[in-house]
Structure formats: structure tokens, C-alpha cells
């Protein structure tokens, strides 16, 4: 398949972890892989050696700036899918998003609309829809060979892979929901979900979900990462034949048809069993077929089987199941609410009392009293917002983040995992804090002596970036759009647009607002912005001048 090559364009893969490496392999073998993007420098080096001639980069803006990149496959953590996919679509590129599509239906709707307006393909990675065995099973169901489908059930069980960024429902169930909805041809009218919490009291390790459809079809899903053996089975029971799709079996046994009958004798139903039938189905790797379909849809301007609308249908069921799970199995409908667990949709009156509006707060996060959180902000797993703190609009607060007490976070800030923003620290709008970076608030702390009356204020100005594992010693000011390299230890003030690296940190150059390093002439080669010196660092020269 040389579709991308024939168009003199290629595919970029963002995220080269557990599943991303499989996308990389397939697009490379299809001679379509042009770029690999990830923040892990060691991983990128390995892939660069493995896939000769393929370029690598660390930042999303480098991907979307490339004119030779036609489409982008996203295999990053689920909470980043919306942001990354949105940027890709706004850059005019086609997008492939791994499951789950996004976390909120409003996000899915926005991405679908963006794709439609731009005339771009948006595809969701429900890979089993491209499995030749499921394709055949769906064909049998649609042709009527199975008869009227009475019920469907699926098991997706294993010991691991255990996650902490999402529960088992969101990790394992999207594929099965996608297949069941495809077979049903309709949306469920009632959903019930129950979970078992064994490894963590707020993250379900086992869930059972029951779907009831308007036609009378019933379906249930059983997913678990605490199971003694691997099982991936979909069973479809029709009134003519029954089908079993068992993906753990050898290819010839992956799909078995059972032409069992129920005969009535003296008013009593009596089962008449028959030997299973095997079908001749050409072998093919589902992910390879999925990648080919993405490229084919780009080339031909067609909608993929798992387009944005299909992703939205699956997302609606996931959200409804999560609501049911949060209410101990209460039956819900897909229209009885929106968004994942604890996504706040407060009215104006409630905003004054609660202090936050239209934001997402994960069920494991802790929000103390007297906290203000702006609309569109997302607070993720195990984070803690202490009293008196204010967080602006459209921020992303990662896992294991502590903010406060009495901290101020501006609009559009991104605080990555394992960061503590202590009292005395102020972040203006658009600040990025990398994973495990450190703020201090007392210059010379002692465990045996209380020194909170010696807190020194730290100000991080608009648009600044602080890299992973960097340390910001209290009492300093980080200038507008400054860039602190990973691992740097900042002990003095940083001018606007300055690049600081090392321990202790020293200036190593200047950075553009877009995040690219400036030339010696203070010109950005990526976006063509120009700068000039001022007493506080640099200042952007208006384009009209």
C-alpha cells in the first residue's frame, strides 16, 4: 500500500509506547511512516535506529509544521487525545486517534465539526472493527444467516495490563462496545454497570455492563485485569445460528458457527445440538488493515468504518456506563447526562456555592473548600487542590498534583504529573510545568523549625515553560515566554523569552513564543517572528513594522 507515498506525503505517529510502537511498525511497513514524535529521548533514539530514514521529534508543533505530513496517528494518554487531535485538525491534517476517542462528548462533537469543515478524515482506533473475523461475523449477522439476534455477550479478561490513569471500563471495554453497537445497528436505551474495586478503592478493576436495545436485543460486557487467564470472546446468539468469535484461538478456530436448534416437543423447548461450522476467512493483521483503511480514506476522501460519529456512539455508551458505575448500577440512558464521572455542569447559582463551573474533576481528586476552578479545566487522578486556591479556565492539572494553599493559577496552564505548586507561587496565563518539576517556597527549610512565615513569592509570567525535573528556587521571577530546560536549577531571575539550562541555571539563548529557539539575529525560523532587546529581555517586533 503506497497511498501516502504516491501523494508525496507521509504519516506521523505521536506516542511510541505500548500501542504506538505497533502503529509505527505498520505505517513503516506500508512505506508511509515519515515522523515519530515522543517526549522520551531514549525511546526515540531506539526507533530511529530500528527504522532507518524515519525522522523523529519531541514536540507537537514540529509535527504540525511539517508540510510533508499528510496524516497524524495519536497514541498518547487518553486525557491528551482532544488537545492533540484538535491541534492536528486545525493544522489541516487528517487524524487517527487511538481508543478511547476522547473523554467528553462535547470534545468529540467539536473534533467532528472541525474535521467536517476542513474536509479531513477523522478515524478512531477501534481496531477489532477491521479484524477479518469480525468483518465476516458482521456480514453473517447483516445477511440474516444467524436469524434474529437475541443477545450478545463479550468477555475481555486478563491478568494486567493494570492502569492507574483509567479504570478497566475505559481501558478494555471500548472495543467490545464498538463491536456490539455495530452488530446491533442501534443505540441502547438503558445501560447498567457494576464494578469491583480491589487494588484501589476508586478505580474499578472489574466491571460488568448490561445494554438493553429498543429492538429487544440484550448485551452484556465483562471486563477485568484481575483474571487468571486471557479471554477475548464475543458470542452472538441468533434464533437460527449462534456464533463465537474467540480471538485467543488459532485462526481457523477464531470464528465458529453453531447451527443449534430449539425444537418444541409436547409444549417443551428441547435443544438440538449440532457440530460447529468453520469458515474460510483470509488471514490479515487487524491493525495493518486499519492503517491501510486510514490511508485509503485519505486518498479517496471517504469516511472510515470507525469515523468520528462511530467514536461518538461508543463514547456515549462509555459515559453512560460510568454514570451507572458511579451510582452502584443504577440504570441510565445515554441521554440522561453527559461527560465522565464528576464532570461538573453547575448552574449560575451553583457556581457561587461550589466555586467551579463546567469543569472535569476525576473521582480520585480531592478539592477542598474555598477553591475556584474555571470552566473547561480538567483535574486528573489523585490531585489535591487546597483551600484558597484559584485555577483559571481551560487548564489541565495532571496526576498527583498538589496546588495550594492560596495559590493562583492563570487561564490555559498545563501542570504535568507529580508537581506541587506551593503557597507563594503564582502562575500567569499559559504556563507549562513539566513532569516532576519542583517549586520551593522557603529558601532554607528545616524539618524541626517552622518557617512558613519566611515564604518567598515566586512569579512565573505568561507563556513560560518549565521542563521536567527542573527546580525553581523561591523568590525568583520567570519572564514571559521564558524556557527552562529539563533538570535546570533556577536561582535567579529569568528575562522574557530567555532559555535557561544547567545547574545552576544559566542563559543559553533565546526562545520564540512558539517554543522554537531563535537565531543569532533573533528571528524564529519556524514562524518568522522577529524580536529586539529590551531591559527585561526580548520584545516581539510587530509584523507591520
Image (cartoon, rainbow, N blue to C red):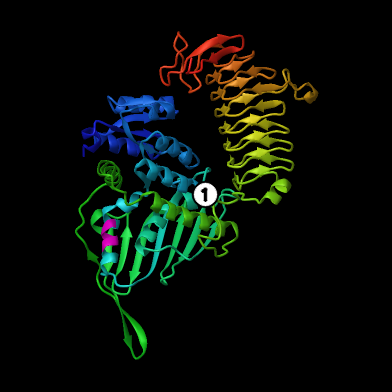
Residue 289 visible here: yes
How many residues crowd mark 1 within 10 Å: few (<14), some (14–19), many (20+)? many
User: Where's residue 206, x and y in %?
Assistant: 51, 55
User: Where's residue 233, x and y in %?
Assistant: 36, 59
User: Is 461 one of the magenta-colored residues?
Assistant: no
Residue 104 visible here: no
User: Where's residue 208, x and y in %?
Assistant: 49, 60
Along the line of sight, which residue is nearer the eye, 527 or 388? 527
Along the line of sight, which residue is nearer the eye, 288 or 215? 215
* Residue farthest bottom in this picture: 266
Instruction: Tell me the residue at 55%/21% (across/down).
Output: 481
* Residue highlighted by disc 1: 167
Residue extent of the magenta highlight: 135-139
Looking at the picture, does residue 402 appear above or below residue 329? above
Looking at the picture, does residue 94 appear above or below residue 158? above
Instruction: Tell me the residue at 36%/45% (across/down).
Output: 123
Please tell me whether mark 1 sits on a helix, a strand or a loop.
loop
Q: Majority secondary structure of the magenta segment?
A: helix
User: Where's residue 319, x and y in %?
Assistant: 51, 54
Image quarter of residue 70: top left
Amino acid at each position: 500500500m503506497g497511498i501516502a507515498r504516491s501523494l508525496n506525503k507521509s504519516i506521523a505517529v505521536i506516542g511510541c509506547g505500548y500501542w504506538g510502537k505497533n502503529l509505527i511498525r505498520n505505517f513503516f511497513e506500508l512505506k508511509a511512516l515519515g515522523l515519530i514524535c515522543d517526549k522520551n529521548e531514549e525511546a526515540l533514539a531506539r526507533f530511529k535506529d530500528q527504522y532507518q530514514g524515519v525522522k523523529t521529534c519531541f514536540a507537537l508543533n514540529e509535527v504540525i509544521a511539517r508540510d510533508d505530513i499528510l496524516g497524524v496517528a495519536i497514541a498518547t494518554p487518553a486525557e491528551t487525545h482532544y488537545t492533540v487531535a484538535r491541534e492536528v485538525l486545525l493544522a489541516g491534517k487528517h487524524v487517527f486517534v487511538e481508543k478511547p476517542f476522547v473523554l467528553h462528548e462535547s470534545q468529540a462533537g467539536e473534533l467532528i465539526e472541525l474535521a467536517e469543515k476542513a474536509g479531513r478524515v477523522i478515524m478512531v482506533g477501534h481496531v477489532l472493527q477491521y479484524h477479518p473475523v469480525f468483518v465476516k461475523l458482521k456480514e453473517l449477522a447483516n445477511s440474516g444467516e444467524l436469524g434474529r439476534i437475541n443477545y450478545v455477550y463479550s468477555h475481555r479478561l486478563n491478568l494486567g495490563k493494570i492502569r492507574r490513569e483509567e479504570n478497566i471500563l475505559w481501558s478494555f471495554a471500548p472495543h467490545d462496545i464498538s463491536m456490539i453497537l455495530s452488530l446491533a445497528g442501534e443505540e441502547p436505551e438503558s445501560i447498567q454497570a457494576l464494578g469491583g474495586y480491589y487494588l484501589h478503592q476508586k478505580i474499578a478493576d472489574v466491571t460488568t455492563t448490561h445494554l438493553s436495545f429498543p429492538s429487544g436485543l440484550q448485551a452484556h460486557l465483562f471486563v477485568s485485569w484481575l483474571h487468571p487467564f486471557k479471554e477475548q470472546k464475543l458470542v452472538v446468539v441468533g434464533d437460527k445460528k449462534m456464533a463465537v468469535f474467540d480471538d485467543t484461538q488459532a485462526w481457523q478456530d477464531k470464528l465458529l458457527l453453531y447451527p443449534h436448534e430449539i425444537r418444541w416437543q409436547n409444549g417443551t423447548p428441547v435443544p438440538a445440538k449440532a457440530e460447529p461450522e468453520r469458515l474460510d476467512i483470509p488471514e490479515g493483521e487487524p491493525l495493518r488493515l486499519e492503517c491501510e483503511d486510514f490511508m485509503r480514506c485519505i486518498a479517496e476522501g471517504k469516511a472510515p468504518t470507525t469515523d468520528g460519529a462511530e467514536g461518538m456512539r461508543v463514547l456515549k455508551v462509555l459515559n453512560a456506563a460510568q454514570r451507572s458505575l458511579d451510582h452502584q448500577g443504577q440504570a441510565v440512558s445515554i441521554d440522561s447526562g453527559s461527560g465522565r464521572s464528576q464532570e461538573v455542569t453547575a448552574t449560575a447559582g451553583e457556581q457561587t456555592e461550589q466555586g467551579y463551573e463546567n469543569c472535569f474533576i476525576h473521582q480520585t481528586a480531592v478539592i477542598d473548600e474555598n477553591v475556584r476552578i474555571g470552566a473547561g479545566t480538567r483535574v486528573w487522578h489523585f490531585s489535591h487542590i487546597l483551600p484558597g486556591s484559584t485555577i483559571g479556565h481551560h487548564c489541565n492539572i495532571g496526576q498527583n498534583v498538589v496546588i495550594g494553599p492560596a495559590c493562583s493559577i492563570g487561564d490555559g496552564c498545563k501542570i504535568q504529573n507529580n508537581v506541587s505548586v506551593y503557597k507563594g507561587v503564582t502562575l500567569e496565563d499559559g504556563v507549562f510545568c513539566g513532569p516532576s518539576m519542583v517549586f520551593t517556597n522557603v529558601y532554607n527549610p528545616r524539618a524541626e523549625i517552622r518557617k512558613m512565615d519566611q515564604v518567598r513569592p515566586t512569579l512565573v509570567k505568561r507563556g513560560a515553560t518549565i521542563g521536567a525535573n527542573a527546580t525553581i528556587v523561591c523568590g525568583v521571577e520567570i519572564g514571559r515566554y521564558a524556557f527552562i530546560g529539563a533538570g535546570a536549577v533556577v536561582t535567579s531571575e529569568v528575562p522574557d523569552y530567555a532559555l535557561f539550562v544547567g545547574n545552576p541555571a544559566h542563559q543559553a539563548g533565546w526562545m520564540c513564543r512558539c517554543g522554537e529557539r531563535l537565531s543569532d539575529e533573533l528571528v524564529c525560523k519556524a514562524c518568522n517572528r522577529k524580536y529586539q532587546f529590551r531591559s527585561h529581555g526580548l520584545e516581539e517586533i510587530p509584523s507591520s513594522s
